[in-house]
Amino acid sequence: MRRFAHFTVRSRLRADADQVWAHATNAVGINAELRPWLRMRLPGNALPAGLAPPARIGRCWILLFGLLPVEYDELELTRLEPGAFDERSTMLTQRRWLHRRRVRAVAGGCEVVDRVGFAPSALLLLRLHYAIFHLVFAWRHARLRRRFSRL
C-alpha cells in the first residue's frame, strides 16, 4: 500500500508573473485563494523579508470557514526565490507535507504550477486526504483563474 501521495495542478493566467507571485506570497493572497472554505493564519501577514531558506516560518493554523481550527502546518521553506518556493513541513494530520509552487512567465501571461505531496499520520486516511487536498488546490486555482483570468 502506498504511504505517500502526490498530484500537480496547473493554470495559465492573463497576468504578469511578478504580480501573481506577489499575490502568492502574502497572507491576503493566500487567503483569497482559500476562501470562503478555509483561511490560513500565518505568524505575520507575509513571509518575512530577507528570508534565507531553509527557514522555519512557524505554526500556521488552517481554519474551516475562517473560524474553526481543523489543521495546522509547521511551515518550513526550503527554497524561496522570485517565482518559486518549496515547502517541507509537518502538519497535525501529515507526517510529511511537500508543496512546491512555481510561477513562470509565458506568452500572454504566466503559468502557476503547484506540486503537492504528503504522507498522512494515519495511513487509512490517505485516499480521503488525497481527495480533500486535491479539491483544495483545484479550488485555489479556480480562484486564481477568476482573479487573474485564464489564458
Image (spheres, helix red, strand yellow):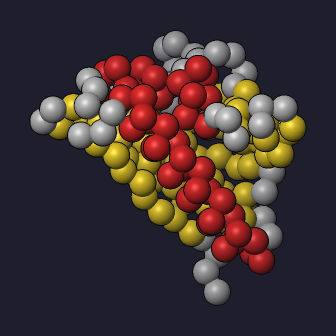
> Is residue 71 visible in the rendered structure shown here?
yes
Q: Where is residue 138 in the image (x, y as percent from the top left)?
A: 50, 52
Residue nearest the viewer, comparing 109 with 53? 109
Q: Position of residue 133 (x, y in %)?
A: 62, 56
Q: For the view shown, which residue lies furthest in the top direction?
A: 49
Q: Is residue 127 above or below residue 96?
A: below
Going 21% across and 31% down the picture, which residue do you hit? Answer: 109
Left or right? Give the position of 49 relative to 147: right
Going 79% across and 41% down the picture, which residue do you hit? Answer: 64
Q: Is residue 9 above or below residue 122?
A: above
**Screen quadrant of the C terminus:** top left
**Screen quadrant of the N terminus:** bottom right
Q: Is residue 32 above or below residue 12?
A: above
Residue nearest the viewer, comparing 44 with 111? 111
Going 69% across and 25% down the picture, which residue do you hit? Answer: 42
Residue 73 in which image quadrant: top right
Q: Position of residue 50 (x, y in %)?
A: 49, 14
Q: For the view shown, which residue lies furthest in the left direction?
A: 107
> Is residue 111 visible in the rendered structure shown here?
no
Q: Where is residue 127 in the image (x, y as percent from the top left)?
A: 66, 73
Going 52% across and 13% down the picture, which residue do you hit? Answer: 49
Left or right? Give the position of 19 relative to 73: left
